[in-house]
Image (cartoon, grey):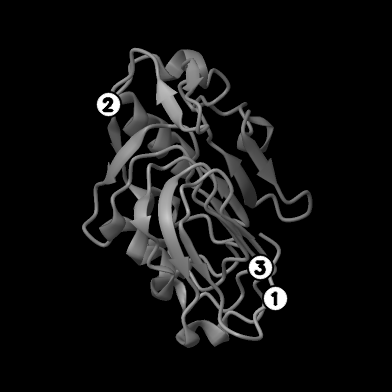
């Protein structure tokens, strides 16, 4: 029912969703674990992975920095509270959808109740920095991808200091000019990969003793 609610929500902005998600139908025969873009635990039958990237399958254009552009596309909003019933969700991919905002004022904070969510990819969307700040509340994350989001200036990584389980942070293909790992981020002791490739970095400073692959 949660997946059908998500489909209905998308349909408000794009009437072609029925064509793009043909197996997502409500009847007594259809089994959601067999639907495209859905992976379930074979034992419990609970949803573990949702690959909802480029959900409308529009043509993606890349400029010379690898940013996502959308041909004949319009921006749209997303309501992340729709995913809250998926208590076993491990991997959520919402990339390349041109989402430009969230319905709820709390941003992504609601996802913090999904204690098993370890991988979140929201690359190729247009979320503003106020929405990104709320990502710090999802403390279960191990991988966070923020590629091709048009981020510029200095990245406020101190806002992610609470992500103590984070192992991979992907900030590639943005327009960042400076980056500093401040002393307060000593708590990110599990961070192994920090990808800041394809940016405009003029200043990059690591706290002494920090060892990362960039």
Q: Residue furthest front?
A: 202
Q: Position of residue 37 (x, y in %)?
A: 61, 33
Of discs 2 and 3, which sits in the foreground? 3
Say if residue 107 shows up in the picture.
Answer: no
Residue 41 left/right relative to 74: right
Residue beneath disc 1: 211
Q: Nearer the viewer, mark 1 or mark 3?
A: 1
Which one is earlier in the sequence, the residue at label 2 or at label 3?
A: 2
Q: CA distance from mark 2 to mark 3?
A: 36 Å
Q: Secondary structure at mark 1?
A: loop
Q: Residues within 10 Å of mark 2 (few under 14, many from 20)?
A: few
State which tag comes first along the sequence, 1 or 3: 3
> To which residue does mark 3 refer?
167
Q: Which of 19/173 is in front?
A: 173
Q: Could you tell me which quadrant the C terminus lies in? A: bottom right
Residues packed near mark 3 inside 10 Å, few (<14), some (14 to 19) or many (20 plus): some
Q: CA distance from mark 1 to mark 3?
A: 12 Å
């Amino acid at each position: 029912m949660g997946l059908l609610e998500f489909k209905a929500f998308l349909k408000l902005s794009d009437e072609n969703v029925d064509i793009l998600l043909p197996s997502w139908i409500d009847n007594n025969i259809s089994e959601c674990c067999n639907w495209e873009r859905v992976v379930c635990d074979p034992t419990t039958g609970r949803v573990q992975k949702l690959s909802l990237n480029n959900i409308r399958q529009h043509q993606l254009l890349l400029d010379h920095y690898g940013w996502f552009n959308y041909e004949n596309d319009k921006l749209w909003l997303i309501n992340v509270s729709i995913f809250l019933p998926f208590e076993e969700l491990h991997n959520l991919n919402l990339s390349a959808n041109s989402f430009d905002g969230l319905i709820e004022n709390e941003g992504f904070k609601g996802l913090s109740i999904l204690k098993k969510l370890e991988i979140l990819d929201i690359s190729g969307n247009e979320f503003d920095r106020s929405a990104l700040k709320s990502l710090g509340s999802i403390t279960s994350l191990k991988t966070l991808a923020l590629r091709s989001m048009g981020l510029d200036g200095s990245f406020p990584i101190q806002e992610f200091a609470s992500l103590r389980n984070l192992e991979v942070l992907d900030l590639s293909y943005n327009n960042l000019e400076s980056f500093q790992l401040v002393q307060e981020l000593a708590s990110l002791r599990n961070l192994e990969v920090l990808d800041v490739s394809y940016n405009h970095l003029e200043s990059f400073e690591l706290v002494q003793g920090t060892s990362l692959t960039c």
